[in-house]
Amino acid sequence: MIITIDALNRHRFAPVLDEMYRLRARVFQDRLGWDVDVKDGKEIDIFDNLDPAHVVCLDDDGDVVGCMRLLQTTGPHMLADVFHSILDGEAPLRSAQIWEATRFCVDTVKLTGSRKRNSISYVTSEVMIGAFEYAQKAGILDAVAVIDPVMNRVLKRSGNAPYDYLGTPKPMGKVTAMAALMDCSDERIASIREFAGIDHDVFASEEDVLKRFSRRAGPSRSGDNDAPAAELREYFAQQLREASNDDEARAVRRLMTAVTEHLPQEAQDALRRIA
């Protein structure tokens, strides 16, 4: 299921974004060996501070398994400011109707290689459908993406082939980078859907996402998905009361932090009060 997180709703989804940044760190730094900035296990760059839209895919367990970042090209963006050598001296695209798509990744450790619902192929297609449908509603006509030859082949095989390229491919570290253009058209979306066998609405409601995501940290209070369960608070309060020394109390607090790090900030604050 897909949720799009932007400047309007990001205050509700800080824990989801944190997990997305952790996925990016595992993929781009650990698996691909890119030279990216990772702090506290999260990969965040300067373009994440420019109010992009993040298309995030969660699986049936509520885990973040795929994502993509969409950023307007009217201001700073990666093709203009990081990968500009691809353009061979030409000016970068700048249009209110063109977005840049970057930081696409999927959790290949958890996902399988088949075309079933919880697979690399399926999640890849779901993220692409979510990105193009979200872009359409925002009035976007085209997307530009910096990709490598492997991703170029993936796009071609999955009914999502670029219709053109900008500049010429250039070596970037261990890979070759190219700038691909894709239109946000009904035909493209239909082609991706046909490839993946997806005919349903890929977007989930914000409430469904919060409910499924919060289940991973323990049961939530009925009608209040933004607060920790009374049982969870009572459990930690009891453990602290029964701690026989400072070391045991510190161990309880460390466990509380680990268990609740993905809960909304209000929930974390409520648990800190019992500590």
Image (cartoon, helix red, strand yellow):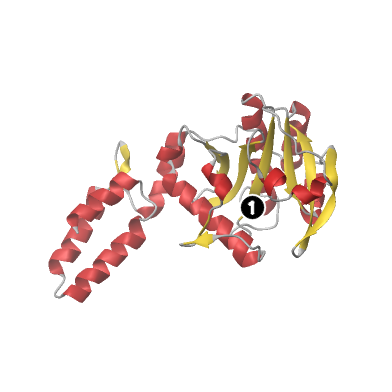
Residue 238 at x, y percent in the picture: 16, 62
User: How many numbered discs sit on the rendered protein?
Assistant: 1
Residue 195 at x, y percent in the picture: 76, 41
Q: Is residue 239 above or below residue 232?
A: below
Q: Is residue 252 above or below residue 159?
A: below
- In the image, 204 versus 143, the foreground residue is 143
Q: Is residue 138 above or below residue 30?
A: above
**Quarter of the figure with the C terminus:** bottom left
Q: Which residue is identified by label 1?
A: 105
- In the image, 98 versus 79, the foreground residue is 79
Q: Is residue 14 left or right of residue 240?
A: right
Res 52 → quadrant: top right
Residue name at image x 53 percent, y 61 percent: 38
Q: Name the amino acid type tagged 1.
A: Cys
**Residue 70 in view in this figure:** yes
**Residue 109 in view in this figure:** no
**Quarter of the figure with the N terminus:** top right
Residue name at image x 53 percent, y 53 percent: 44
Q: Is residue 201 left or right of residue 226?
A: right
Q: Is residue 19 above or below residue 253?
A: above
Residue 243 at x, y percent in the picture: 16, 71
Q: Is residue 184 left or right of residue 27?
A: right
- In the image, 168 versus 181, the foreground residue is 168
Residue 210 at x, y percent in the picture: 42, 41
- In the image, 63 versus 275, the foreground residue is 275
Q: Residues within 10 Å of mark 1 (few under 14, many from 20)?
A: many
Residue name at image x 68 percent, y 47 percent: 81
Residue name at image x 42 percent, y 48 percent: 15
Res 138 → quadrant: top right
